[in-house]
Amino acid sequence: MKLEYQPKIVGFLCNWCSYAGADMAGTSRMSYAPNIRIIRVPCSGRVDPLLVLKCFQRGTDGVLVSGCHPGDCHYNEGNYHARRRFALLRDFLDYLGIARERLRVEWVSASEGQKFAETVASFTAELAELGPRSES
Amino acid sequence: MDSELIHQIGNQARDLLESGTVKGVIGYERASDGLTARPFFAYEPAAVERLIFDETCSYNLVKYLLDKKDEKMAVVVKPCDSRTINLLLNEEQIKRDMVFIIGVTCPGVVETSWNHKGQTLQARCQTCQLSKPLVYDFLAEHEPVERLEGELYLDIQEMETRPVTVRRAFWLEQFERCIRCYACRQVCPGCYCPECFAEQLDPLWMGIRIAPKENELWQTIRTFHLAGRCVGCNECERVCPVDIPLSLLNRKLEKEVKELFAFQAGLNPEELPPFATFKKEEKLGFEE
Amino acid sequence: MKLFTSKDDLIRWLNSLLRERIIVAPVRVQELTVFQPISKVEEIAFDFGNTTLSPKGWFLPPTETLFSVQNNDGQPKLVPAVIEKDAVIFGLHPCDARGIALMDSPFLQEPGDALYRERRARTALIGLACHQAQPECFCTSMGSAPNDPSHVDILLTEVEAGYIVQVVTEKGERLLPKGFVEYKGALPTPPEPQAIPIKEVIPAIRELFNNPYWERLADRCLHCNICAYVCPTCYCFDVRDYSDRGNLERVRSWDSCQSSGFTRIAGGYDLRPTKGARLRQRFYHKLLYFPEQFQDVACVGCGRCIKACPVNIDIREVMSDLQQLEAKSES
Amino acid sequence: MSLDNPFVPYLATLKSAVRLTPDVKLLRVELEDPDIRASFIYKPGQFALLSAFGEGEAPFGIVSSPQHGDSLEFAVRRIGTVTRGLHELEQGDILGVRGPFGNYFPLEDYVGKNIVIIGGGIGMAPLRPVVNRILEQRDDYGKLLIINGARTPQDLVFAPEFQVWVEAPRTKLELTVDRGDEHWGGRVALVPDVVKEVAPSPDNAIAITCGPPIMIRYTLAALRKLGFKDNQIVTTLEAKMKCGMGKCARCNVGDKYVCQDGPVFTLEQISQFLEQP
């Protein structure tokens, strides 16, 4: 049965690094799980917790927030703020019963197509292992 | 009821009103049950006769300063409430010179509801670390107050050890009861957005349905917006008409913020709150 | 007609009712007592002061779908919501039954509110007389009484060894099982809730529209929605569209005249912009506008708002303040 | 709007959407059901609730004239979510209509009187059917003075109709804007100031006004100063509404419900309940 379950992932990718990284994965013809729906954002620092909550509310199995590596933010410090925010949000969601594995933060640069593909693959596998969220 | 304390508060309030230093004094008076306290606004010197102070004065009156920004007000502030003053100063919601703080030492307050006065101190008082307000212009004090040392987060830790599915079920059950009366927001001194996300129509974050999913979104984001800002006055939990254990949410974030960022809201009006700053070297559990 | 039933027979009767219809009854949830549909008769709380929320939510639910918008080959089709099952509300006190009778005025007045009307027609009310008055109760001043059978279909009064059953309407009679014997004794003396002067309030209030009293009272008010949501007669609602994963519905939810966006229109203009104006609206609606429209004061004296208000805005105190203010302005 | 459930709107088709100003569109809609179309009888001043499904419902004055065929016209200013939804509809799209609701301008009572119409911005919309009605039955009424203001010349909602208005007998049109542009040769002044300047006589006159709240407040003051009595001043109010049937208890001004007792009121009816400035 587990094979048939395909988790749905929403990915918020920063325009400058991770979106380009995903693009790199595509143009390099790397294959990765088709479970992710990508939303391009200007910066990982733009990702409001509301956006993440809204995804979970509407039945998403996992949310990926991905931005430039610390130190490389196009806006200098957006991802530092994102890091604090999602460290806390992940703990909090886990406490509310949305397992911490369901919110993933990864730093992916424009040249890391491989890392992006691997991230999606491993996230998908991990979510498949967790199974569907009970209430959706 | 400590009549000496009331005497000191009353005298100070009368002086302030008679001299015209302040437009009004925000304090406590006896509620209509003749037993508990309620907030009271004294605008005339004669009205200070109605001021009281006792173990039923759990209200955090600092919230009211947000409605009175244009006029200088005096406010009665317990040690715990003084953290709210610092919070609002830090966030530039109040001006120090527009507030006269009548600090008061406090032996703790009990759980109250209309016509009911509890016997034991509120949980937050049992672990209160403050013997007097952090900031005040006048201090009404009588007997020295002893501080108790207690374990702050036993209930949170207990919740953390439950399986994630059990926590899920627990919280959904709590949120199902929510009727979205917004009393938790209205009473909260940290909730002062001119337009709350809950009422925003464009973008529409929260649907009109008063139903578990919307309620969960409400309570989750409400709490998260107070991360590193909640001063633990616990007024939200006190006013909740359907007994949602909101302190289990607020104090979870308080605990995490303390552990992750070594920060506690309202202790210092100058210190940057955790989401206004960062440390380049911190990893916070995310691989680089 | 007065009958008698033992508690055991009452339970048996409720069990048989539960087989064919929904029973909404007071149930204890942690420290609260709330009306909700039960799955077993054992869930019913028989001994309670006042429930935390009134039973109005059965007729005007906190949230309900008015109609759904379905896509019919690219053309929208509107499908009204329907009420499918009969119900009984069991255990409501006379004041709450009067609350429902008061809500009938706006909702049944033409054009009738379809969902409300349907629920009302398909729901029978089995009331429970109060054997104790709570400190916040003042029903006798508001046209009701702890043993008032006026607005229920059947009224039960607890006595030693069982319940006196007063059958008030035909609807109630149809629910009744065979075998209840006639009760020949007298009804027990009802408890006496506090009486408050109310007669002079109504004429007084009209003159006080611009009195600073309202802004002063609003100083303390938090403008939460608790008073409106616990009130058995407050019926303000909001209507908006709700969509979730392709399903589109028009939804009605509770709302309160105390909420800040209640009268604010797109563009920002607000008919009642100040806290004082909003708080005044609550009392004016209950004590003046509603009676002007429908005769009765929109308060049944259940005292829930008094008990639940986080800052002790006590409607009895407000009424007495108004009378004093008016007396002062006249002299 | 079925008989069974008054919250269910009639379905209607958008026949055309004409841009009147940068943020106002004139929507012409036709009710789908011919029987309902025939029974949808309204008078100048009444309103309907329009639904943009997915966004919600809001009240709009009906700006067409009842005798002008089967379509209903609404001048909709894009200002919030519902109006955005209505603006985004395209010709042939379906929307919802509930109504007609409310009272109307008692024009038959004004026969023989001089009429002063004072409209500001989109507030001119509900007054348009009044103007049209008077022009159609021109002999029944005395002098007609129209004072119409807007933020800029582009925002004068019914500009294409001005020519017809000024050419009508015994009719005067006074236009004003808050800010002019290079083509504007007319008045730059606030509506209440124009009222003071033009100074219509209160004798045997009725003043009908609609506009933004701040304009209304000062216009009422100006009219009173000119000697208009509160029963000679008529206004139509805008309020947030959720039902249109006096049930949602939201739109009242004092004890008057805008949806049922209004939206048309004389100042006499509501002055005691207007917030003190």
Image (tube, helix red, strand yellow):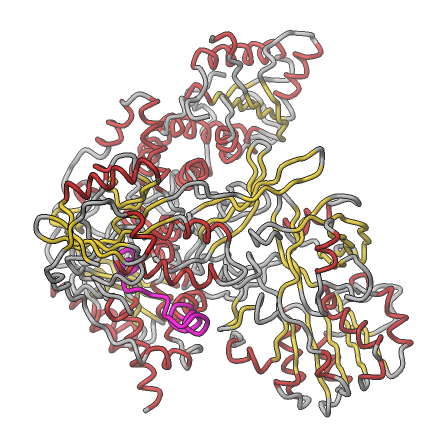
> Residue sitting at 44 percent across and 65 percent down?
C278
In magenta stretch: residue D21: no
Position of residue D124 measured from the top left corner of the image (x, y, whole percent):
74, 68
Query: Residue C167, relative to residue A46: is it above or below?
Result: below
> Residue sitting at 25 percent across and 37 percent down?
C15
Indicate the quadrant where residue C302 lies: bottom left
Of the pair A84 and A11, the residue shown nearer to us = A11
Of the pair A33 and A89, the residue shown nearer to us = A33
Position of residue D252 measured from the top left corner of the image (x, y, whole percent):
52, 68
Left or right: residue D185 compared with residue C290: right
Total labels drawn: 0
| Quarter containing the C terminus of chain C | bottom left
Position of residue C236 measured from the top left corner of the image (x, y, whole percent):
45, 58
| Quarter containing the N terminus of chain C | bottom left
Left or right: residue B66 compared with residue D169: left
> Residue sitting at 77 percent across and 49 percent down?
D14
Range drawn in magenta = C284-311
Query: Residue D193, relative to residue B40: is it above or below?
Result: below
